[in-house]
Amino acid sequence: MTTSDMVGLRIKTVRRQRGLSQAQLAHPELSDSYVSLIESGKRTPTPAVLELLAQKLDCSLSYLVNGVTAEQMEDIELALGYARLALENGEVSEARTRFAELLTDNNLTGLTKLRQDTEFGLALATEAGGDLREASAILTRLRSEETTPERAVELAIALCRVYRDSERLTEAVEVGEQILRSHARPTWTDHLVELGATLLSAYLFRGDMLRAKQFAAELLNAADTLGTPRSIVAANWNASVVAESIGHGEEALAFAERALAVQSENGAPRNLARMRGAYGQLLLRVRPGQAAAARDVLTRATEELTQSSASTIDVARCRLELARAEIVLGSPAEAMVHIRAADQLVPDNVVALGTEGDLLVSRVQGALGNFAEAEISARAVQERLSRLPHSRRAAGTWYAAAETMEMLGDADGAVEAYQRAMACAGL
C-alpha cells in the first residue's frame, strides 16, 4: 500500500468506529465525494485537511499520518534515542539489544524513516560488536530500499567500511565507486568526502596506488572548496595515509597533525579516538625514536575507543599498535599483554588483523628467547595469510612475516614468505 492508501484506510476505519457516514464527516467544510476519494487513496489530503479530519474524528493527527498516537510516537523516538546514546557511550551490546527490541514494535512498521533509522543503528552496533557479516547484510538490505540521498551516502560509507575491514576489497570499491564514479555524481558534500576517504582506504588496501594518489588530491581540492571541518579532516587524514604509503613520512605526519587538530575541536568521540590511534601508529613508524610518545598517544586512544561507539576491531588494532610500541621500547612482556587483549577482540572473519597479532606473538616470543613458540606462531601467520586474496596489505604482512622468520633463523620459510610478498604485490 502507498502512504495515501494507508492514510485513507485509517480515516475510513476511525470514521466507522465513530459511527459516521462520509457525508457526516464531510459536512460542512468538505464534500462527501472528496472524503470518498481520500479514503480510497485516490487523493492525498493536504496537511490542513488532515488536521481538520483529525478534529472531526476526535483522534490525533499523528495517528492519521503515521498509524500511531502521539504518545506511541514519543515512546518510539525515546527508545531510539536511548539506543543511540548507548552506542555513542560504547555500550555496544546494550545498544544492539535496544535497537533489535525496538524493531519488534509493531507500531514501527508504518514509520518508514524511524524504522530505517533503527535498522541503521542496529547495523552500526552490529559492526561495533565485530559481526561484520551480519552488519553488511543489514546495510545491503537497507540500500535496496527507497531512502533520502543523504542516508544513501551514509549507508554507502558504512558498507564500504565493513567490506574493507572484512577484506572484501573489490566489493568495498564497487560500493564507493557506484556513487562517486557515476556520471551523475552530485556536488561534493561532507558526506561525499567521507565516502571518498573510505573508498581511498580500500584503494590503498588493494594496492591501487596511482588511483589512490590521484583521488587523494581530488579530495583535498574538494575539502578546500567546502572549507568544513569534516571534509578537511577526512581529506587530510587520507592524504596522510597516501603520503606515508609512498615513503613520505614527515609529509604524512604534517597532514595527520592538521586532521587531528581539526578533529579535536569538532569531531565525534569515536572518530577522534580512531584518528588518535592511527596517529600514534604513524608516529611510531615514521619516528621510532619517539616510541614512548607514540605509546602515550596510543594508550589515550585505547581508553577513548572503549568509551565510544568504536568497534572491537578499532580497539584491537590500537592494542596491537601498543604492542609494537612496547617491542620498540624493549618491553616484550608488556607487548604480550596487549597482543592477548587484542586477540580476544578480533572476529574470526577479520583474518588480516588476526594475522598481525600472530606475527607480533612470534616476534615477542623470539625476543623472550622462546624460539619454539615463536616458530609455531610464525607458521600460524603463513597459514592465515594463505587464505587472504592478493593485496597491498597482504604483501606487507607477508614481508613482515619473512623478516620475522629470517630473524628466527628459518631461511626456507623466509624465502617462501618473501616470494609470497612479491606475488601479492604483483611482482
Image: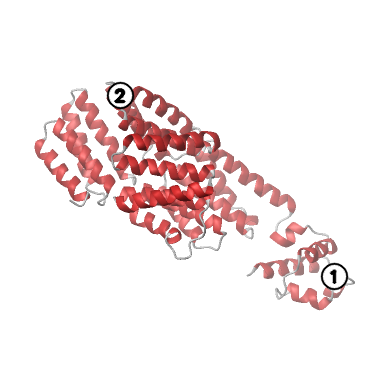
Where is residue 15 shown, x and y percent of the image? 80, 68
Q: Report which residue position mark 2 lands on.
A: 289
Q: Is residue 347 visible?
A: no
C-alpha gap between disc 2 and disc 1: 81 Å
Q: Earlier in the sequence, mark 2 or mark 1?
A: 1
Which quadrant: the N terminus?
bottom right
Q: Looking at the image, is mark 2 or mark 1 nearer the viewer?
A: 2
For this view, does 301 lie left or right of residue 406? right
- Tell me the element at label 2: helix
In this rendering, the answer to whether 395 lies above or below 60 is above
Which residue is nearer to you in this view: 92 or 277? 277
Q: Residue furthest left?
A: 412
Q: Amino acid at mark 1?
A: Leu
- SS at mark 1 in the image: helix
Vertical arrangement, residue 344 with respect to residue 294, above or below: below
Which residue is pictured at 22% across the width and 49% down the height? Answer: 425
In this rendered view, identify the residue nearer to me: 225 or 300. 225
Residue 25: assigned label: 1
Q: Marks 1 and 2: in contact by CB < 8 Å?
A: no
Whether residue 116 is situated above or below residue 420 in the rendered picture: below
Q: Nearer the viewer, residue 44 or 277?
A: 277
Is residue 178 at least partly visible in the picture?
A: yes
